[in-house]
Amino acid sequence: MSYSFFDFLQLAGSLGIFIFGMKVFSDGLQKVAGGKLRAILKGMTRNRLMGITTGFGTTAITQSSTTTTVMVVGFVNAGLLTFIESTGVIMGANIGTTVTAWMVAVFGFKFQITPIAIAMIGVFFPFLFVRNQKLRNTAEAMVGFGILFIGLDFIKGSVPSINDNPEMFAFLDTFTDYGFASTLLFVLIGTILTLLTQSSSAATAITLVMLAQGWITFPIAAAMVLGENIGTTVTANIAALVGNVQAKRAARFHFLFNVIGVCWMLLVMAPFLLGIDWVMQVASGSGVSVLGDDPAARTNATLALSLFHTSFNVINVMLIYAFVPQLVKLVEKIQPEKPGEREGFHLRYIHTGLMSSAELSLEQAQREIQHFAALIVKMHYAFTGLLFKDPQKQKKFLEKIEQRERITDQLELEIAEYLVKILENANLSLPSIDRLRHMQNMLHDLERMGDIYYEMSKTYERILQDELRVPEDVMDELYEMLRTVHDALAFMTRNLRDTTVKVDMKKAISIENGINNLRDCLRNRHYGRLEQGVYSPRIGVMYLDLLNRLEKVGDHIINVNEALAGGKMRTVTSL
């Protein structure tokens, strides 16, 4: 045997080049897609058939079914998708991942693409340093495409030769003589291979190379592809471990969907492969069977394996499509919802870590900030309830405000850490860096609002504890101030929800001026009451404190609107 440990390291390095090229290619495609990818994702919720199309399109763009399914788990956890809506996207992703196999089979084995790949890198590499962001992203995708096929060529050259290593082939051949047990064994090997590479695309490429080199037969390669279909579900299930019950159900559905498909395929494996062989013989016109061990059939066998991969996934979707409601019920029984599991606030969008592109990561952070703002609105309602609802519920409102203030501190910390990770690990464009910095400013302003509502609740709690009587007209003035601030909060949250529409800063400034003018008016009335002795100075100090703090909330609100508009952040001044 002439295959050494150094030769094995070369194979491992070749696989690393292939996976790295796939990552660069995928990242570049996602950056080029930009808004188109977001548009595709928006189509998820229409119906199951649209979901399948969406899953296929997203996977074709990202070149990774793992990216799509992990993204879906995150969206389900966030409430952007329901569990049932996610099923279509997951099924479509299974079809979309077969595009990579066709790309590798056609360009990697039917054509001598390596010289073209090297030339492509030479053409596009200089464009990685240009100012034009779109051109730079396109160059990144093309360079990744070139590296991918250079890595594939290295893999083909690093796989041991059968003629030089007959002992290795004989060892492998001993596992192919057990009939159905051999098929199951290689399904397991395909699953393990995907787990080790953390990429079904890389596992499929290795399988194609082994098939082309004659190390395995077409039926064995087909069994490995089935195993790779199971292995690709593991990443999404790991991502769902920290998600809510709906996210776990989406991941379990992906696993069951693929396992059921593998089970029925194993039952009809022999006739199905005969059908694939017949199609290839007719299409090629060669009359050479891909089921044999003829070296002349190996190139066609790689195309046959890609056809098997696509046919299996398409037919699996067609067969299970009508039974999705029953499969959903089964998953719900396997993963029941525990009492109180939906309660509490937590990060909803970024629990799975960084997405495969900086733009998608920023979208997750943006949605988390929307969730943050919604929490501030709830604190506003709780403070209003503390002042004006049933006195018997005042303790409950105080507890809610205190609990939510702690949550705002944690939200600011975790989202800020996520933004730092994006900055450190992603190749951001200048507009994206600017957007990220505005997000950091928004986080600070939202957290300060949470602090202010908590401080106001403690001020009013002292009024209650000391049983101070606040005149009715003073309470009416506070209600008027709270209503004005609420209008500002509502305008801010609308702007946060729809970032595609330009922020109307004239209206934002008008609302802010309204808060300032009302504060000045009410403060003048306060001084008049003090002179007339309407209430004690202690009540007056507390009343003035509440007015000033509510005005500060307005300052932070205008800051958030300015950050959304991309303008220069104003400094919030203390009074």
Image (cartoon, rainbow, N blue to C red):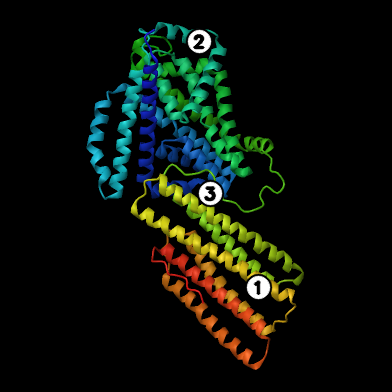
Left/right placement of residue 93 relative to residue 531 reads left
Q: Quadrant of residue 322?
A: top right
Depth check: 470 or 477 in front?
A: 470
> In the depicted view, which residue is nearer to us: 56 or 369?
369
Whichever of callouts 3 and 2 sits on the residue coming sooner in the sequence is: 2
State the residue at coordinates (53%, 39%): 88
Q: Which residue is mark 1?
A: 459
Image height of 31 relative to 267, above or below: below
Badge 1 marks a residue whose secondary structure is helix
The 10 Å Cα crowd at callout 2, few under 14, some 14 to 19, many 20 or more, is some
View extreme (bottom): residue: 532
Side of 393 relative to 379 (left or right): right
Q: Amino acid at mark 3?
A: Tyr
Select label 2 or label 1 by which is in front: 1
Residue found at x 65% / y 66%:
382
Q: Amino acid at mark 1?
A: Thr
Which element carries disc 2, helix, strand or loop?
helix
Q: Is residue 13 above or below residue 56?
A: above
User: Residue 255 in the image: x percent, y percent?
Assistant: 57, 32
Q: Which mark is residue 40?
A: none
**How far separated are the C-alphas under marks 3 and 2?**
46 Å
The reply to whether residue 114 is in sight is yes
Pinpoint residue 27: horizontal percent, then vertical percent. 38, 40
Whether pointer 1 and pointer 3 mark residues with C-beta atoms closer than 8 Å, the reply is no
> Circle 3 is placed at which residue position?
349
Front position among marks 1 and 3: 1
Q: Which mark is residue 176?
A: 2
Name which residue lies at 44% across and 19% down. Answer: 276
- Amino acid type, callout 2: Thr
Give coordinates of residue 367: x percent, y percent: 50, 54
